[in-house]
C-alpha cells in the first residue's frame, strides 16, 4: 500500500479534487464571497494608492483581504508542490504533441511544466522573448478587465453561481485559446524561436 506522501505526489483523481473545489465554492457562496485571482491585482493596486488615479480602484479593499490569503496559499502551494511533491517525471503529453512542438523549435517538449525557451534566465535576456511576454501580459490584462474577471473567477466561481456572463466568458476563453494554438501559434513560433 502506498504511503500518504506517495499518494499526494500523484495527480489527484477527480473524485478527490472535484469535491474539494465544490466544498470551497459552497463555503464562499455561503459567506457571500466570489473567487478570482485577478481581483487580487486590483486589491494590491488599491493598497498601493492606485485609487488616487482611477475610480476603478476606489473600493473598500479591506473587505478583499481574504482573497489575498487565497493568492498567498496558491503561491505557497505551488512552491511546496514543485520543491517537495515533484517526482521530476516528464510531463505526460502525447507523442504527436511532442513532435508538433519539436517541429516548432522546442528542444525538449514535455520535459518540464513550462518550456525553457520562454521561461528561463537565458530566455528573459532575449529581447524578442521579453517583448512577447510583455505583449502577452497586456493582452491577458486587457482581456481579464474586459471580461470582468479571469479564468478562475469565471470558470470556477461564476459558473458555480450560475452566472450567464461567466458561461459566455469561458466560451470566449476557450475559443481564444483554440484560435491561438491552431492559427496564431504556428505563425509565431518560427519568428520567436
Image (spheres, helix red, strand yellow):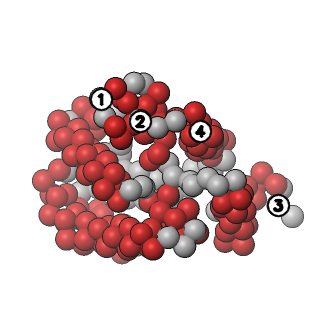
Left or right, 79 with reference to 174: right
Q: Check disc 3: other Cα within 10 Å, few if <14, some if 14-19, many if 20+.
A: few
Q: Helix or strand or loop: what does disc 3 sit on?
A: loop
| Closer to the camera in the image, 176 or 160 | 160
Tell me: residue 150, above or below residue 184.
above
Q: What residue is pinned by disc 4?
A: 63
**In what quadrant of the picture does the N terminus appear?**
bottom right
Label 2 vs 4, first from the N-terminus:
2
Report the disc number at residue 2: 3
Rounded to the nearest angstrom, the CA distance separating label 2 from label 1 is: 9 Å
Task: Report how far apart the C-alphas of labels 2 and 4 lie in the structure.
Answer: 12 Å
Q: Earlier in the sequence, mark 3 or mark 1?
A: 3
Residue nearest the viewer, comparing 115 with 14: 14
Q: Residue at x 63, y 40 (%)?
A: 66
* Label 4 to label 1: alpha-carbon separation: 21 Å
Mark nearer the N terminus (3 vs 2):
3
Label 4: few (<14), some or many (≥20) within 10 Å? few
Q: Where is mark 1, residue-wise? A: 53
Circles 4 and 3: CB distance less than 8 Å?
no
Please state which of residues 65 and 23 is positioned toward the viewer in this rendering. 65
Q: Position of residue 132 (x, y in %)?
A: 21, 46
As displayed, is residue 169 above or below residue 79? below
* Residue 118 spot, x, y in % from top left: 31, 45
Give the label on residue 58, or none: 2
Residue at 57% in and 50% down: 88
Percent coordinates x, y for residue 74 in the rendering: 58, 44
Task: Give the distance between the C-alpha atoms of the residues marked 4 and 3, in whole angstroms.
Answer: 43 Å
Q: Secondary structure at mark 2?
A: loop
Amino acid at each position: 500500500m502506498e504511503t500518504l506522501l506517495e499518494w499526494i505526489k500523484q495527480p489527484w483523481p477527480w473524485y478527490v479534487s472535484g469535491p474539494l473545489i465544490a466544498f470551497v465554492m459552497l463555503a464562499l457562496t455561503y459567506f457571500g464571497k466570489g473567487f478570482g485571482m485577478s481581483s487580487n491585482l486590483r486589491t494590491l493596486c488599491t493598497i498601493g494608492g492606485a485609487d488616487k488615479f482611477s475610480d476603478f480602484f476606489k473600493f473598500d479593499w479591506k473587505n478583499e483581504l481574504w482573497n489575498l490569503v487565497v493568492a498567498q496559499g496558491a503561491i505557497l502551494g505551488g512552491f511546496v508542490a514543485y520543491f517537495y511533491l515533484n517526482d521530476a517525471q516528464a510531463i505526460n503529453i502525447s507523442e504527436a504533441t511532442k513532435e508538433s512542438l519539436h517541429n516548432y523549435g522546442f528542444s525538449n517538449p514535455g520535459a518540464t511544466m513550462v518550456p525553457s525557451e520562454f521561461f528561463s534566465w537565458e530566455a528573459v535576456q532575449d529581447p524578442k522573448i521579453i517583448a512577447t511576454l510583455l505583449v502577452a501580459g497586456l493582452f491577458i490584462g486587457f482581456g481579464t478587465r474586459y471580461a470582468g474577471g479571469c479564468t478562475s473567477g469565471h470558470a470556477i466561481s461564476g459558473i458555480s453561481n450560475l452566472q450567464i456572463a461567466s458561461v459566455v466568458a469561458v466560451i470566449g476563453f476557450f475559443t481564444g485559446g483554440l484560435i491561438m494554438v491552431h492559427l496564431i501559434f504556428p505563425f509565431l513560433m518560427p519568428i520567436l524561436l
